[in-house]
Amino acid sequence: MVTRTFFDNNLKELKEKVLHMGDEAKKAVILSMESLVEQDSDKAQAVIAGDNKIDHMDEEINEQAILLIAKEAPVATDLRKIIAALRVSSEIERIADMAVNIAKSTLHIGGEKYIKEIIEIPKMLEISLEMLTDSLTSFYAEDAHLAKKCAQRDDEVDEMYGRLIKELMGYIPQKPTATNQITQLAFVCRYIERIGDHTTNIAENVIYLVTGKNYDLNA
Amino acid sequence: MSTLTTTERVFDVKDLNLWYGDNLALKSINFPIHYNEVTAIIGPSGCGKSTFIKTLNLMINMIPGVKMSGEINYRGKNILSDKVDLVELRKNVGMVFQKGNPFPQSIYDNVAYGPRIHGLKKKQELDEIIEKSLIDVALWDEVKDRLNAPAMGLSGGQQQRLCIARALTTKPEVLLMDEPTSALDPISTSKIEELIFELKEKYTIVIVTHNMQQASRVSDKTAFFLMGELIELDDTTKVFSQPYDQRTEDYISGRFG
């Protein structure tokens, strides 16, 4: 017999809000990468302007979570669901900040011709975004197995990051006038690597939610 | 199932079965109770929690048709089979009920009742015991100027604290509390809960409660009973964060019961 329909509906709603916020962050990241590849300052500006909305979603999730804790006195799994929602939303908020950072790098580079075509960086981002999608799915489905699997892919991102940074740094002696552009591109790689880390943190929170244990997937 | 450590046990209940007539109300209960700990017993109505607590000082024997098997070892002695001095047992294992039940006497005489029946007559010693007991339950300041007033004139929360004071005068080792705050307002409830914290220093406390948050606040160990079975007994922090049994989780999170 289910006796806490109202509370259960609220928990579900909270989860859906987190998922929705995750989708918005993902869109922002994709748009920021488009702005970089296409050197489109309008898209970059749109990402920067849109961050407010995501921050607002984070606040809303926080408020609802706090209210649920205060009103419903949750324990055990219920409590972990709320704590996980709080933590995951703040990871998503950071991911959205990375989109803003990438957009700002686009603006810093401006119309300057790229030293080479931007191909590898979007590929790296693609892996991060697949991870993000999986981690959000695992959060929604409370699937610790999927969470673990998605976090394992962070090694691919880290490996690519190392390779790209090395390559980019290698261009500096050859093209010293492009140092600003190269640095900005290296920053972008760093931001994407951070997205992978935040995604791993989301996966860790899913495992916490399901098992009650803290798990370091970066180790 | 349990992460319980074995500190010294004041009670060690082993394989306890209890029947009301033909109805098996407690099923093979194994339940250690440790010195100076607060153990909370939770569970839906009719799960056997009050029955269980009443076996610990054999108050249960006052109900006709009760049969028991197994062991209830109190300080190493099985009170079910060995010869037990019931007066002595109940002096050591005191009890407080759901609603304050003061005798229709003065505040003073209520608290003096226990020591008097145990033979204490000297006024000065009685005065000391009464003052100390009333201080222990944080009631002294509220009643010191009207010790001869009728106890029935006290508020519900005061009556309950008076009854706890009365239970303490015989210096019990264990205090059994059967839903001691269910009839009280939040302020009186928090006074009793704070009292439990203080009493824990000197006494072993077993408390039956319907208030889940109370159990999580005041107790060291929590036991969950369901239909006469002890489903889970573990550290309170464990029970309220990661219960072992799904039925415990469903109950503490308010999904049945």
Image (cartoon, coloured by chain):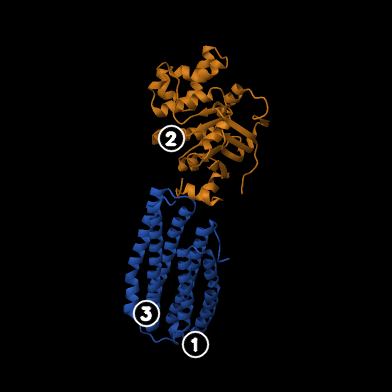
Chain colours: A blue, B orange
What is the C-alpha distance between the residues marked 3 and 1?
26 Å
CB of mark 3 within 8 Å of CB of mark 2? no
Amino acid under disc 2:
Ser
Q: Which is nearer the eye, B116 or A111?
A: B116
Work out whether residue A27 can be spotted: yes
Q: Residues within 10 Å of mark 3 (few under 14, many from 20)?
A: many
Q: Position of residue A139 (x, y in %)?
A: 47, 64
Residue B13, quarter of picture = top right
Q: Which residue corresponds to mark 1?
A: A174
Q: Position of residue B93 (x, y in %)?
A: 57, 28
Amino acid under disc 3:
Ser
Q: Nearer the viewer, mark 1 or mark 2?
A: 2
Q: Which residue corresponds to mark 3?
A: A35
In screen coordinates, is B35 left or right of A21? right
Residue A11, quarter of picture = bottom left
CB of mark 1 within 8 Å of CB of mark 2? no
Residue for point 41% across, 22% down: B143
| Marks 3 and 1 on same chain | yes
What is the C-alpha distance between the residues marked 1 and 2?
80 Å
Q: Which residue corresponds to mark 2?
A: B182
